[in-house]
Image (cartoon, rainbow, N blue to C red):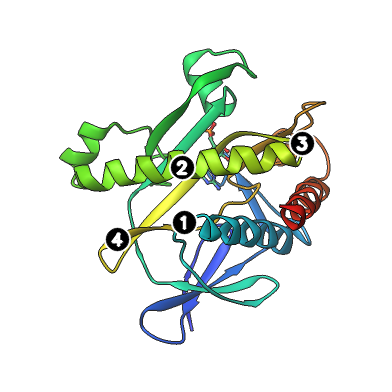
Amino acid sequence: MELYKGKTKIVCQGTDENTVILRFTDNVTAFNGEKCEALPGKGETGFAFSNLLYGFLEQNGIETHMVEIIDEATVEVKKAEIVGVEVIVRNVAAGGFVKKYGAKEGTVFDEPVVEFCLKSDELGDPLINESQIRALEIATDDELAEMMRQALKINKLLCALFKKAGIRLVDFKLEFGRYENRLILCDELSPDSCRLWDVETGEKFDKDIFRQDLGDLVSGYTEVFDRLSKTLTVV
Ligand code: 5GP
């Protein structure tokens, strides 16, 4: 039974009350849904990429929502209460950071930058600081510290992995959920929610291909998926 239709995923009832089923669609959206298209193969490639990363993170001590992959675009996940902030980690200046703060695209940070954004399509996911998060009772101090700790650990693991695949992890967005009194990694980690550049050429393999009309999005996603799966089989 369908419970909810998101911009890129359909959420259905799980096999018991502790799970839900997510189906990745071919939809791709940008600029808060203003630009939207269905690109054949996009759902499956993004899904395969995210599964690969979540498997890698689980092996390295990060608990994710994954329960069981059902088919090439469908997964059963733990039913968590999603925390109402997105956690963004940046290693290199791009996108919103360039636009908001006037940094030069490509500037490499000495230390990763972590940002929180309010999860609200209506308000355009605005930046929100820790004191505002506390005032709005979106998350507790302990939860904020835990999200920050996990985000930085995930960044370290992924930077090392992508480096082996000749890819620079520029930035990415995470979502966490409350499940049995702990925070687990939810949603997805795909080229929809990361910026991925070729280490040598700077070529972009992520959703910026769609945002900036740079070419074939699905080919970009397939290229990073292939590189990553080769890297993971030799690790
Ligand atoms: P920026 O703030 O530069 O637009 O985004 C930083 C990073 O977070 C990028 O990799 C971007 O794809 C990801 N990101 C930010 N907001 C969202 C969102 O609402 N959905 C998805 N899928 N990714 C997001």
Is disc 1 in contact with disc 2, using a CB cutoff of under 8 Å? yes
Mark 2 and mark 4 residues within 8 Å of each other at the beta carbon: no
Closer to the N terminus: mark 1 or mark 4?
1
**Numbered label attached to residue 61:** 1
Q: Residue at 78% across / 61% down in the picture?
A: 40
Q: Residue 230, how many percent across, how many down?
A: 80, 53
The image position of residue 51, as x and y in percent, is 62, 62
At label 4, which amino acid type do we have?
Arg
Front-lying residue, 193 or 198: 198
Check disc 3 and give the amino acid type. Gly
In the foreground, 56 or 133: 56
Residue carrying label 2: 153
> Distance from label 1 to label 4 (Cα)?
14 Å
Marks 2 and 4, the one that precedes in the sequence:
2
Ligand 1 closer than 8 Å to label 4 CB: no
Q: Which residue is mark 3?
A: 166
Which residue in the protein does label 4 denote? Answer: 182
